[in-house]
Amino acid sequence: MSSQISKKIARMLMEGAKLRQEACPACSSPLVQLKSGDLYCVNCEKKVVIVSNESDIIEKASLPSTLSNLENVASFLIEQSINRLKGSTPASMNIELQNVLLLLDIIKKVRELKKA
Ligand SMILES: [Zn+2]
């Protein structure tokens, strides 16, 4: 972070803005939250919308159904991978098996989260 940006951020904080933990997706500078609630990147000199933050909120609101959806999708993909395995060459078989292992790992984690 350049000292110029630090100074700008410091000035905005004095004006009532808050420093956020999130970094700018474009330049990784720390973001400040304006009084209006908007997030602002001092380096890019523009307002920033953090998408992951919003989806975090959505996930928290509907975590159980999101997990069930994820489990369903993973199960479906495993089924597809198994179907592809039937006619596959050893090389692509390896890739499919790795896919299946990844998906199984996802399902395992989903189930752990559901229990939590
Ligand atoms: Zn930026």
Image (cartoon, grey):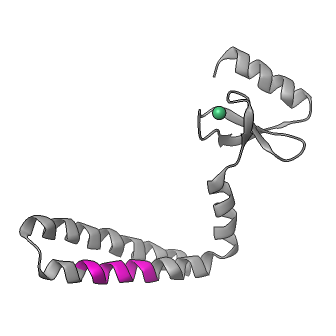
Would you say 28 lies left or right of 78 here? right
The percent position of residue 65, horizontal first and vertical second, equals 59, 81
Q: In which quarter of the image is the C terminus?
A: bottom right
Q: Which SS type dominates the magenta stretch?
A: helix
- The span shown in magenta is 72-81
Q: In which quarter of the image is residue 109?
A: bottom left
The percent position of residue 98, horizontal first and vertical second, equals 24, 67
The percent position of residue 62, horizontal first and vertical second, equals 66, 76
Residue at x-position 45% and y-position 83%: 72
Q: In which quarter of the image is the N terminus?
A: top right
Q: Quadrant of residue 11?
A: top right
Query: 87 and 19: which one is in front?
Result: 87
Query: 2 and 85: which one is in front?
Result: 85
The percent position of residue 83, horizontal first and vertical second, equals 22, 83
Residue at x-position 81% and y-position 45%: 38
Task: Name above or below for residue 53 compared with residue 68.
Answer: above
